[in-house]
Image (tube, helix red, strand yellow):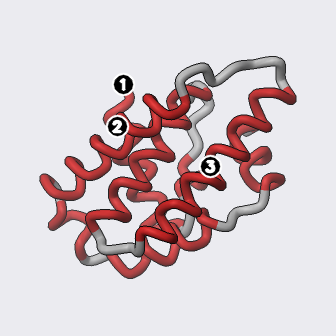
Amino acid sequence: MILPKLSAAILSMSFLGSAYAGVDQDTSLDQWVVISGATNGAADVFGVSPEDIDQHRHTALAHLIRYAEERGLQVSEFDQLFERGQVEGRKLVEKHGSLVAAARKDFVTGFMHDKNIEYHNVKKALDT
């Protein structure tokens, strides 16, 4: 069930300007960590700088951990889940690159947005 969510996040970033725009009510916090990793991995394939990729990871970690703490939840394996997402995001773009290649510029713009997204926007999306 996570593969369609990863694809949706990558497409949301390309067409809606943020991976958080493609929110699904049934998405768990752990799945959001994987999704964040997937968009991070996809950005790597698209040639985003290592500094921007690191900043995106840091922002996702900070916001998702804060969200979890505010709700008494845990993300116990952030690094492993995020890295799994990175691998899957890279694979998706490499395998289906032609589907998102035309939207590469928009994806990168969305990635740059999410790299610096404010917490209240993430909270709003996850509360949907």
Looking at the image, which is closer to me, 103 or 76? 76
CB of mark 1 within 8 Å of CB of mark 2? yes
Q: Quadrant of the C terminus?
A: top right
In the rendered structure, which disc, 3 or 2, sits on the residue that comes first in sequence? Answer: 2
Judging by the rendered image, the residue that carries numbered circle 2 is 4
- Where in the figure is residue 37, as x and y percent of width and height? 44, 45
Residue drawn at x 44%, y 29% is: 80
Q: Amino acid at mark 2?
A: Pro
At x 62% / y 31%, what residue is drawn?
25
Contact between labelled residues 2 and 3, with CB atoms less than 8 Å apart: no
**Residue at 41% across, 74% down:** 49
Give residue 55's quadrant in the image.
bottom right
Disc 2, SS: helix
Q: Which mark is residue 1?
A: 1
Q: Amino acid at mark 3?
A: Ala
Compared with 126, 48 (above or below) is below
Crowding near the residue tagged with mark 2, few <14, some 14–19, many ≥20 C-alpha atoms within 10 Å? few
| Residue 66, picture quadrant | top right
Instruction: Report the residue marked by disc 3.
Output: 60
Instruction: Work out whether mark 3 precedes mark 1 in sequence or the reverse, and give the earlier one.
Output: 1
Single out the mark in the foreground, 3 or 2. Answer: 3
> In which quadrant of the rendered image does the N terminus lie?
top left
Query: Callout 1, which amino acid?
Result: Met
- Disc assigned to residue 34: none
CA–CA distance in space, label 3 to label 2 = 20 Å
Residue 36 in picture, x, y percent from top left: 50, 46
Q: Indicate the secondary structure of the residue bearing disc 3.
A: helix
